[in-house]
Amino acid sequence: MSSMNRVFLTGNLTRDPEVRTTPGGKKVCDLGLALDERRRNAAGETVETTCYVDAVVWEKQAEACGRYLKKGRLVTIEGRLQQDRWETDKGEKRSRLRVVAERVHFLNGGKGNGAASAEGAADVEPPAEEDARPF
């Protein structure tokens, strides 16, 4: 039986993108997303819940995210889930699930002030398969 690992998420950034360079010279950007859901409970009251998701973006997309995105900006991320596992200095086993973004779509609007417009993102080099693809 085959499996599929594909994720599409739309949400607001919980913090400004954090771009850094790996020891090997690759650009990497960490993003945090808040995914809001509204539903009615059994009493008919509207209940809002938020799911927080971490994502990582690589290379040219990482640079574009750092340049054009800010906290509160609405984005759609396409990618795959990855589970990272490690052991602490005390020997405790840890793990986390995050999204490895293959595409980041910059959407208009969002909760933050001063977010760059999608038109401003057009200054990025023409996108290759793994580059940011602003709407």
Image: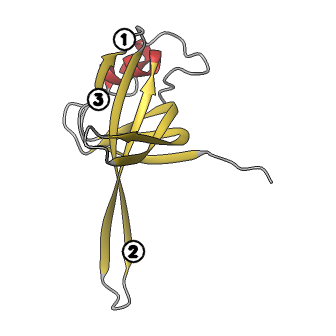
The residue tagged 2 is: 39
x, y percent for residue 77: 48, 39
> What is the number of the mark on residue 67?
none
Of pointers 2 and 3, the one earlier in the residue sequence:
3
Q: Residues within 10 Å of mark 1 (few under 14, many from 20)?
A: few
Cα gap from disc 1 to disc 3, whole angstroms: 19 Å
Question: Where in the figure is residue 126, as x and y percent of width and height?
Answer: 54, 12
User: Given the current orientation, which residue lies at the most extreme front position?
Assistant: 91
Q: Amino acid at mark 3?
A: Pro
Q: Nearer the viewer, residue 26 or 76?
A: 26
- Tell me which colouring the rendered structure shows: secondary structure
Tag 3, which secondary structure? Answer: loop
Cα separation between marks 2 and 3: 30 Å
Mark 2–mark 1 distance (CA, rounded to whole Å): 45 Å
- Image location of residue 97, percent across then percent down: 44, 47
Which disc is residue 23 wearing?
Answer: 1
Left or right: residue 57 compared with residue 18: right
Residue at left 41%, top 38%?
55
Q: Is residue 1 above or below residue 37?
A: above
Q: Are marks 2 and 3 in contact (CB under 8 Å)?
A: no
Q: Earlier in the sequence, mark 2 or mark 1?
A: 1
- The amino acid sitting under disc 2 is Arg
- The mark closer to the camera, 1 or 3, is 1
